[in-house]
Amino acid sequence: MTLAEPSFPPLLNGRVVIKGDNPRALAISGAQSGELGAGDTLWLQDTTQIEIAIVLEPDDPLSKSIQMLPLAIAAAGDTLAVLTPPQVGLQFRWPTTLLLNGASAGNCTLTVPAACKPDDVPAWMVVNFSLRFMFDETTEPGTTPGITSLVEEGGEELSTTDVLESYSRHFLSQLDTWSNDGFGDVSQQWSGRIEGINETAEIAHPTGTITARPLGLDEDGNLLARPEAGGNTIALPLIDCIERASTAANPATSPTS
């Protein structure tokens, strides 16, 4: 099946990446080399998997611009809330996972230069949104507990193009709100959709897993949680959840305009 080329908002410059290549790796490599800049948007030409990587050039230090990670996930939530039936449960699992009806369907990542410190303004950032659109024909329904796809959760009338276009619009909308009004809207969305908001659960963090009740995000994007054993509320640092690119990748192929 031929995939229609998505129509992106004017601020984003779409570049197709053929199946078998990695939009995120290509975006990082291009940002490191200077071949790609703010607004360049690499999308995967695939009918089963959604991948979109957006290059950013922030004006704020990492300590603030790191909020692009929960913002990207909030934009994914907006996208899926619009495209899926009302009865589909949509949640966020700290720090980067999207859940549909309690099962993992996708995630977001944020990559910055390796040497970038919290007070530094990153030369570039790459936001990546990944979503399993449908299982391949070798996967039997019901054989992947805890993992799902958009098609299995009511998205059978959609195409990957629909999702790419919707995500790009919602990401820019979230970015505009963040630029004008701050982080509050993203924080509220996370608090309303975070997994386990009213119960104690195992919370996985890059530095280790804790048993606690998630309370939502603070004004910096860190996860506030109350440990099962009691005591003071703790904050799981958002900065632990980003990825750092130490060396430029050397992909065999490049995205096309």
Image (cartoon, rainbow, N blue to C red):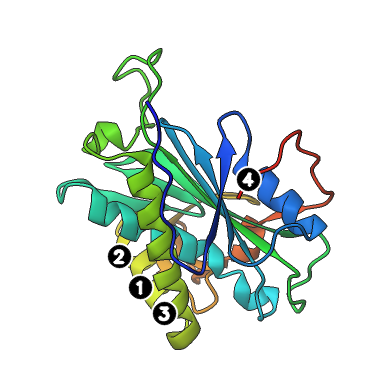
Q: In the rendered structure, find residue 188 and report the number of the disc placed on it.
A: 1
Measuring 76% from the left and 37% from the top, which residue is drawn there? Answer: 251
In this view, the residue in front, 189 or 231, is 189
At label 3, the amino acid type is Thr
Disc 1 to disc 3, how far (Cα)?
13 Å
Q: Is residue 74 visible?
A: no
Mark 1 or mark 3: name the one nearer the start of the chain: 3
- Residue that badge 2 annotates: 192
- Relative placement, left or right, of 212 versus 36 is left
10 Å crowding of disc 1: few (<14), some (14-19), many (20+)? some
Is 226 left, or right, of 86 in this rendering? Answer: right
Marks 4 and 1 in Cβ contact (< 8 Å): no
Which residue is at a point 73% across and 58% down the rendered structure image? 31
| Quarter where residue 99 is shown | top left
**Percent coordinates x, y for residue 180 in the rendering:** 45, 87
Q: Amino acid at mark 1?
A: Gln
The numbered mark, 2 or 4, whose residue comes first in the sequence reads 2
Q: Residue at x 43, y 86 (%)?
A: 181
Residue 149 in the image: above or below residue 208: above
- Cα distance in 3D space between marks 4 and 1: 38 Å
Position of residue 174 measured from the top left corner of the image (x, y, whole percent): 42, 71
Q: Which residue is mark 4?
A: 256
- Mark identifier at residue 34: none
Observer-side mark, 4 or 1, equals: 4
Q: Is residue 198 above or below residue 106?
A: below
Which residue is depicted at the point 79% across and 67% down?
116
For label 3, the residue is 177
CA–CA distance in space, label 2 to label 4: 39 Å
Q: Secondary structure at mark 3?
A: helix
